[in-house]
Amino acid sequence: MEQMKCDIIQDLIPSYVDQICSEATRKCVEEHIRSCRECQQMVGLGRNHALSREKMEQKELDGLKKIKQIGQLKGLVCCGLMLFLVVCLGLNLFVFKENVLSDSGYTVMLIVCMILVLISGAGYTGRAVYRGKGMGAGAKEESGSREHLQERKISRIAVWVIGVVSCSVCAYIFMLDVGIVKMMQAGKESFLGKKLEEIGPVVEGQVIIGFAICMIFLAYVIFRIFKYGKEGNWLICLLVADTFLLFQYVFLLVRIDTIETITWALLSMTARTMFIGGVGIVCSLLISHYLKRKAKGI
């Protein structure tokens, strides 16, 4: 009879140790182990095992947290280095008036910046930000859903605005350069009310404004990625490509001598930069899709 009671108590010990049993079961087990040394030892072993399991789980969580922190640091370093290179090129070109790169040099530097963006791994967490206070579970879920939908809507609008504005700036400068080329081909001495020698500074001033807009957008997207875990590496690739187009359009104005050269250079550098930017965007989206599927265990 006593052995049968021990067998029953020992079946209850796991739920007792994990604290998931009823109050009556807890009292029954505690009353029994006061007089049964064997069952008391089993409770002690169960508690040690549970403590060991908790430590192991905590160790795994700490390891995952450390990996995440390393990934975030890697992303910050890569994106920071890319932003530093772009800003330095802009300062040299617009402030110090020193063109430190050739046409092929701009292409190489653009590829380097694209690689830095791709290996940064920034913006692939896609974590949702939810904050709710003083509500029940049902209300929290409903409110969180509304807030999440509203946040996604605002985020999409911001992305569209950034993409459209940055591309429009480059398209405007491109058309301006095309207009200058046509003016030169027609043998005209003025364009948009400006003489030929006055056009360069005017275009450069507008490019500087476009560069400032792209830098503001770029800083915002990087902040949005690392602060809120939003995806956006593809948008960084687009902004970097647009910025390098602006660099090369200014570079074009100061180094081209003949109409034939400027026409070919304008078309080739635009196509080349758009192609590299497109490859960066596609790679960013593919990497993001892969990591999403991997996180979901698909």
Image: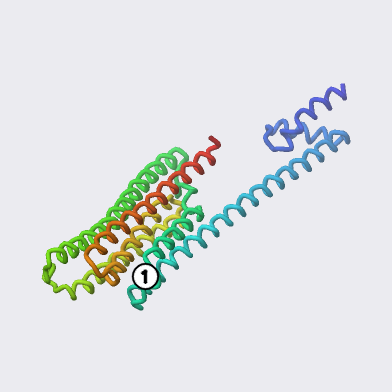
The answer to whether residue 105 is left or right of residue 120 is left
Q: Which residue is mark 1?
A: 90
Residue at x 42% of width, y 40% of height: 139
User: Who is closer to the viewer here, 155 or 2?
Assistant: 155
**Total tally of numbered discs in the picture:** 1
Q: Quadrant of residue 261?
A: bottom left
User: Who is closer to the viewer here, 3 or 157?
Assistant: 157
The answer to whether residue 92 is left or right of residue 74 is left
In the rendered image, residue 34, in percent from the top left (x then y), is placed at 84, 37
User: Who is closer to the viewer here, 280 or 251?
Assistant: 251
In the rendered image, residue 120, in percent from the top left (x then y), is placed at 50, 56
286 over 115 or under it: above or below: above
Residue at x 36% of width, y 54% of height: 238
Circle 1: element type: helix
The answer to whether residue 119 is left or right of residue 276 is right
User: Who is closer to the viewer here, 126 or 133?
Assistant: 126
222 over 157 or under it: above or below: below
In the rendered image, residue 286, in percent from the top left (x then y), is placed at 45, 44
Q: Is residue 130 visible?
A: no
In the rendered image, residue 249, in percent from the top left (x then y), is placed at 29, 65
Residue at x 88% of width, y 36% of height: 37
> Which quarter of the rendering shows the N terminus?
top right
Q: Amino acid at mark 1?
A: Gly
